[in-house]
Image: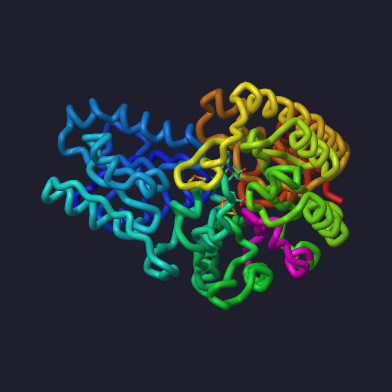
Amino acid sequence: MQSKHVFIYTIGCQMNVYDSQQMTAFLASDGYTPTEDIDTADLIIANTCTIRAKAEQKAFSFLGRLATAKARRPGLIIAIGGCVAQQEGERILRRVPHVDIVFGTHAVSRLPDMVRQVAQRRCRIVDTTQVEGIDAHEFLPTIATPSPVSAFVTIMRGCDNYCTYCVVPHVRGREASRSASEIISEIEGLVAGGVREVTLLGQNVNSYGEKEGISDFPELLAQINAIDGLTRIRFTTSHPKDLSEPLMCAFRDLSKLCDHIHLPVQSGSDTILKGMNRQYTRSVYLDRVAQLRTYCPTIAITSDIIVGFPGEDEADFQATQSLIDAVGFDGLFVFMYSDRPNAAATRLPEKVAETVKRDRLQQVLSQQEAHTRRRHRALVGQTVTVLVEGRSKQDHAASGGVGARLPVQWMGRTDGNKIVNFAGVDEGSGERRNLTGSTVDVIIKKALAHSLWGEIAPRR
Ligand code: SAH
Ligand code: SF4
Ligand code: F3S
């Protein structure tokens, strides 16, 4: 079979990163190998996101830039997948004349077939069919990225929560979970290939298996915890309304489950939470956080905040700020509210001005910076266990072009998901070892704004 090259441009969440890996895996059997060089690609895929208007614009501007490449190389096949494809369907064929394939969020496994048809018949194809449930044949064993040590595994897709600002239920379809046995065998395969950490993905992982009446999420975690050779388990995202006591116990009881939870709160105002259809109040959120901390006192908690939801006034915004101080998050993602097609809040009249949104965004970012610094500073002098992912970005050996030499500086993460860069010379022997994939005890020496700096702890 002649070797052909596929270039995939991925925008959006970790689930899209996983889906891009799936695209690579499905296309491999048709002779496609991934390339980083867009100019030599026979097939270019944009895997897109529409969570905010900006993400959607990014997808169309990428597609726009491909017009000249297509004119120069008519044999080039251009496909758009992911959430914008699902949302816009065949409208994309009219808007972008050089696009050949539009494939939705449930169509990844059918991509090779569509590509073959386009190559043979030079037709244009749209497939945005969505199905209830989730089948084994829709997934292939994945390769480990973003690093050889850590891999993503989708355990469920879709969402049934219909938060009023959110496009996800409209573009990813109804919630459905994969079977535990499939998930376990996928992870076992990854571990056999050298992976030490998995991040389980879903829009609302703590309702895993609920609809199907298969195992529940804490049970699944316990099964994964038993896999030999796996060091760490992470998951994202959990909805605060479904943060159950058994899940809190899992943080205490399962040795491989990392002490970190991403628990998006969105707002600290009850009026806004109601308008968002989040199904919890400020005090329920704060109570759950307090309870979680009794089960796992060291747990790192990160969250998402939306500023400028329709109707958010100064008092609502202050309630968000006071919640941020009350929890003292380890990290925050902050977003300006953006109207989305089909999302109910788009129809709400009291829109907040862009300038106000921008100002609130800045206020929250600087407020959080102080919390992040405080959390980082508290780790100075402590010994933390780091799972090494590879060479540090600041490594001088990397920039000096020393090629095969082992790095001087390494990068990894703590249990609580904090990035640690450290010098990699073994104190005892003075030797340099390849540390990728190993867990190393590191003494934290310096707290920076976005990471920590340390040295390998002397062996006890
Ligand atoms: N399923 C996850 C989050 C998915 S989207 C959850 O339930 O939390 C990731 C984040 O994007 C959301 O948590 C929210 O903070 C933000 N977001 C979603 N829709 C948005 C919109 N219309 N405007 C601004 N931010 C949005
Ligand atoms: Fe969107 Fe809400 Fe579902 Fe998260 S839980 S994906 S924010 S609808
Ligand atoms: Fe974006 Fe779709 Fe993920 S809208 S955030 S890529 S689910």
Q: Is residue 173 left or right of residue 242?
A: left
The residue sitting at 87% across, 51% down in the picture is 460
Up-down relation of residue 337 to residue 120 (above or below) = above
Q: Is residue 390 left or right of residue 31?
A: right
Q: Is residue 423 visible?
A: no
In the rendered structure, does residue 238 fall within the stretch colored magenta?
yes
Up-down relation of residue 18 to residue 351 (above or below) = below
Q: Is residue 237 left or right of residue 63?
A: right
Up-down relation of residue 71 to residue 456 (above or below) = above
The residue sitting at 54% across, 60% down in the picture is 160
Q: Residue furthest left?
A: 121
Q: Residue furthest front?
A: 349
Q: Is residue 228 left or right of residue 66?
A: right
Is 207 or 72 nearer to us in this picture?
207
Question: How many labels sit on residues?
Answer: 0
Q: Which residues are magenta?
A: 227-248
Is 88 or 259 nearer to us in this picture?
88
Is 47 or 452 nearer to us in this picture?
47
The residue sitting at 80% across, 32% down in the picture is 373
Location of the N terminus by quadrant is bottom left
Q: Position of residue 116 (x, y in %)?
A: 19, 53
Q: Position of residue 7 (x, y in %)?
A: 34, 40
Location of residue 345 by image quarter: top right
Q: Position of residue 30 (x, y in %)?
A: 25, 55
